[in-house]
Amino acid sequence: MLTRKVVFHIQMLKKAIISLVVLAIVLLYFIWQTNDLTVSRYTYQNKKINGMPGGYKICQISDLHNKVFGKNQSRLLRHITKEQPDLIVITGDIIDDYHTDVPNALKLTNRLTTIAPVYYVTGNHEHHAKPEAYTELLEGLERGGVTVLLDEAQKIQLEGGSFYIIGLDDDSRLDKTLPRLVSELDENAFKILLVHRPELFEAYASTGVDLIFAGHAHGGQIRLPFIGGLYAPGQGFFPKYTCGLYTLGDSTMVVSRGLGNSIPGRINNRPDLVFVTLEPGL
């Protein structure tokens, strides 16, 4: 017959085992949420696209923060290659200023340029990195065939049409750079804007740009059912712009949940690879 002391120890052991199992499940879920790559696909229509080839596909990479998906980014590259994008845009924070690894970032971008033309704008982590790392990154991107847009616009010519792609440096987000850039372009042309921070959507939309790609919010880091993101830099708690499509006037903004982390861990918010297909509008 078991003594009370033995029964007590058995009960404590059971509780410890249950606690360890629960902890293991939570840990595995946490790891899965942080590393399982998801794909978000959107279709965007605009009458200014008329005359351009239908089905033009843009891949957005944002907030990678030096994260690696498989050896030599094999998982990430496999998803991108499968989608066959016509254009790849990187909207900042491809490196992380806490543990900057420029060679790692360049290995990816060198591979991306073999898939489609790549356009890049800076994020806050690029500007917070050491100056030598920032210079190494930008020079390496340009050597590898990436178009670095630091407060400039380029015209992309396609069969049957064309559009402008504008890149706003993260340090220029609060000045008059964007209105100046847009004023120098044909007002009837289709314009894509690459930026890092979504919280300035109203300012971007006021310039008349059509389609905006942004990141930075990390999907709100923790996403709550029926509520959405919990916290985003630049927006605070319960942020307005965390992921998906937002419309204001004639402007639409695409916000990526991002691929990596500056703050460890994600909950209900897996890494996000975005594809937007452009179609003629009515």
Image: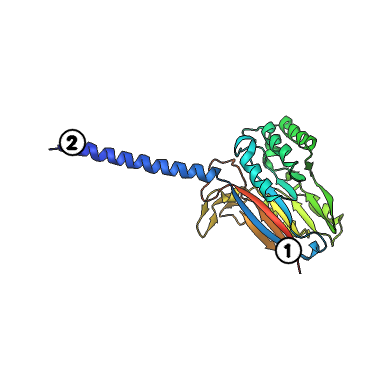
* Left or right, residue 14 beside residue 274: left
Q: Where is residue 271 in the image (x, y as percent from the top left)?
A: 59, 47
Q: Distance between the residues labelled 2 and 1?
A: 72 Å
Q: Which of 67 and 175 is in front in this view?
A: 67
Look at label 2 and name its amino acid.
Lys
Look at label 1 and name its amino acid.
Gln
Q: Which of marks 2 and 1 is in front?
A: 1
User: Which quarter of the picture shows residue 253?
Assistant: bottom right
| Image position of 27 with respect to 246: above or below | above
Please name the residue shown 86% across and 56% down the image: 185
Q: Mark 1 points at which residue?
A: 45
Q: Can residue 152 be seen in this view?
A: yes
SS for dot 2: helix
* Pointer 2 local density, CA inside 10 Å: few below 14, some 14–19, many at least 20: few
Q: Nearer the viewer, residue 34 or 228?
A: 34
SS for dot 1: strand
Please name the residue shown 61% across and 35% down the image: 71
Q: Residue furthest front?
A: 82
Q: Quadrant of the C terminus?
A: bottom right
Q: Do the residues labelled 2 and 1 touch (CB within 8 Å)?
A: no
Q: In which quarter of the image is the N terminus?
A: top left
Q: Residue furthest left?
A: 1
Q: Mark 2 points at which residue?
A: 5
Q: Can residue 63 be seen in this view?
A: no
